[in-house]
Amino acid sequence: MMVSGTETVGEEVLNPQRLRELKERSDVIFVGSSFVIYKEQLRRAREEVKIVLPSRPFPPLEDMVGARDIVSGSPSPPVDHYLKARMGVDMEDPDIGTVIVGLNPAQN
């Protein structure tokens, strides 16, 4: 998501109905197929516009025994680069991404 202070300037929209509605509007800019920038909020932005990558559920581990509150997030490009360099991963391979997963131990 893109924010300026507490104002959302842009966001990823995953709801198909909402995407269809937004595609009909002239006051938004699409970046790719699902990221929307709101022109008026961007114009009114008084603080620095920042990209915030919120945590998301991580379905592959949702049924993991002994874990709860499982979330995932994508690191910023500099952190992604750093992690790939530390792990010896080919940074030029477009098919390799980085996801950081966090969880809490389940309480008995």
Image: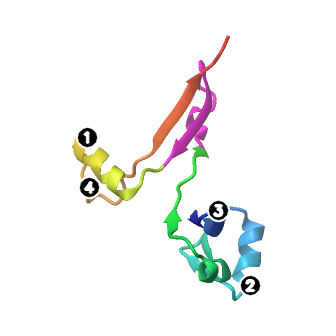
Q: Which residue is painted at 65% across and 67% down in the image? A: 8
Judging by the rendered image, the residue that carries numbered circle 2 is: 24
Q: Does 57 appear above or below 94?
A: above
* Amino acid beneath label 3: Thr
> Residue 75, percent across and down?
43, 50
Q: Does 47 appear above or below 72?
A: below
Q: Which residue is painted at 33% across and 56% down in the image? A: 78
Q: Are marks 3 and 1 in contact (CB under 8 Å)?
A: no
The label on residue 91 is 4
Mark 3 to mark 2 CA distance (whole Å): 26 Å
Judging by the rendered image, the residue that carries numbered circle 3 is: 6
Q: Residues within 10 Å of mark 3 (few under 14, many from 20)?
A: few
> Residue 31, percent across and down?
54, 76
The label on residue 36 is none
Q: Which residue is painted at 23% across and 47% down in the image? A: 85
Magenta segment, which residues? 57-73
Judged from this view, the residue extending furthest toward the bottom is 26
Q: Quadrant of the C terminus?
A: top right
Q: Nearer the viewer, residue 95 or 40?
A: 40
